[in-house]
Image: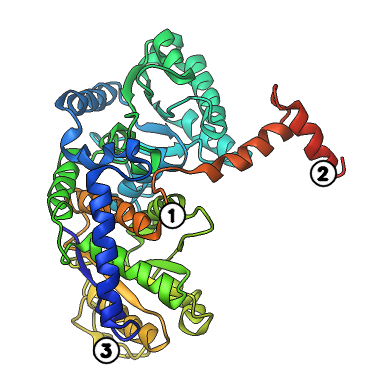
Amino acid sequence: MVKINVSGCDSFVKEEQYKQYVDKALAAWDTLMSEQGAGNDFLGWKTLPEGVSEEELSGIEEICKAWAAKGIDLVITVGIGGSYLGARCAIEALSHNFAKQLKRKAGDAPDVVFAGNTLSEEYTSELMDLAKERNTACVVISKSGTTTEPAVAFRIVKQYLEETYGREEAAERIVAVTDAKRGALKTLSTQEGYKTFIVPDNVGGRFSVLTPVGLLPIALAGFDIRAMLKGAADQKSEMYSKSEANSAVQYAAMRNLLHSEYGKSTEILLCYNPKLTYLAEWWKQLYGESEGKDGKGIFPASVTNTADLHSMGQFIQEGSRIMFETVVSIDKSAREVIIGEDPQNLDQLNFLAGKNVEHCNKMAQLGTKLAHIDGGVPQMEISVEKIDEYNLGSIFYFFEFACGVSAYTLGVNPFNQPGVEAYKKNMFALLHKPGYEEQTAAILKRIGE
């Protein structure tokens, strides 16, 4: 379960102002819970912890077993944005840091890698180098099947699987997560006989990690999705309690207060474990796409300490005072390494002998908190007991629910993304997509070609 500590902001804000923003956040909580606010047709994520059916979970587990029986050791997951970030976040967090360097053992879950999130030719060609060395399958995630980046990647992967294994066997090595009734990918899945899972109509991509969009790749990587859903369900129970002690209400209230009254335009999500780097990437999409509209929003950024204390640390400590920090803190490390004593003590570290590395990490975290507060950077802390499936489920649900409350507090629709289409129209015109001839001519004239 997620805990929150906002005391690192006490010296920056007035108590009566914070209470006012708690009241605003509680009003936003009412809007979210009543399902009468803007974007209310995209609230299916609220009930996902218990809304994922046993049929879906069993279907996911059957795919894991069937592909294990085929000896598949590489799964290419094709998707972009919310169609891959949640799964990648969970897999990175739960995996051994050096899983790719360790020798594979019999019975290991397949490696899950990602495609369709870039148009880099080098990345795509190197991905196919890997596919040719391994026993490969593919999960393709797209509601429409026509989003350019994943559609390009899937065309290439599909062609490789059919040429390598034959069309019939390739169909058994491809699973689609897509719309229930319509779209190019749904049509192709029906034609080719792909096993399919549904992207719910009432769940936007950035809120979809607890649907098969996220659950299937996470399960294929060998992790317990039922425990993840349990963590989300337990977190949901707290989120559904209307109270000033509700952690989502506190988070939404403080971040909006710092932004609106104190000019803090940037929020840095900060962690002290590299396993959580992709949690920050998932969070940045969730909050950036949900709040960044109508000329409003808090810019989401991230750092991973202690590494970034030696790069971004100077700016955070003494640069423009535009930011506040939210630290994701882990109470217990899953491993222990004790620092030994050295007779020469040339590095002058014998004062640490007998202590574990995580103790040093915690003291670095505390020391940084005090330094940054002294330097004018307010800090909140989000904490869970440890990194496992249960606690990741709690974190996912906490941030999703808090995002809805925070965006309504800010006064925007959390569930649309009208600005995302702008680059696509230009890209299609420059690629000479049929139907874009007029835009193509206008852009070429604009750039002088």
Query: Which residue is more in the foreground, 267 or 156?
Result: 267
User: Is residue 291 rendered to the left or right of residue 251?
Assistant: right
Measure how far apart labels 3 and 2 are at the Cα level.
65 Å
Depth check, mark 3 against mark 2: the one in front is 2
Q: Which residue is mark 3?
A: 350
Residue drawn 51% across and 40% down? 117
Q: Residues within 10 Å of mark 2 (few under 14, many from 20)?
A: few
Q: Which residue is mark 1?
A: 291
Instruction: Tell me: 257 left or right of 421.
Output: left
Q: Where's the N terminus, which quadrant?
A: bottom left
Disc marking residue 446:
2
Name the front one of labels 3 and 1.
Answer: 1
Examine the rendered structure and indicate whether residue 373 appears above or below residue 191.
below
- Which class describes the residues within 10 Å of circle 1: few (<14), some (14-19), or many (20+)? many
Asked whether the viewer can see residue 165, the reply is: yes
Q: Secondary structure at mark 2?
A: helix
Reply above or below: 366 against 177: below
Please name the residue shown 25% across and 34% down the image.
106
**Which quarter of the image is occupied by the C terminus?**
top right
**Mark carried by residue 171:** none
Judged from the image, the secondary structure of the residue bearing numbered disc 3 is helix
Q: Is residue 250 above or below residue 135?
A: below
Callouts 3 and 1 close, C-beta under 8 Å: no
Please say which color scheme the image uses: rainbow
* In the foreground, 99 or 305: 305
Depth check: 66 or 142 in front?
142
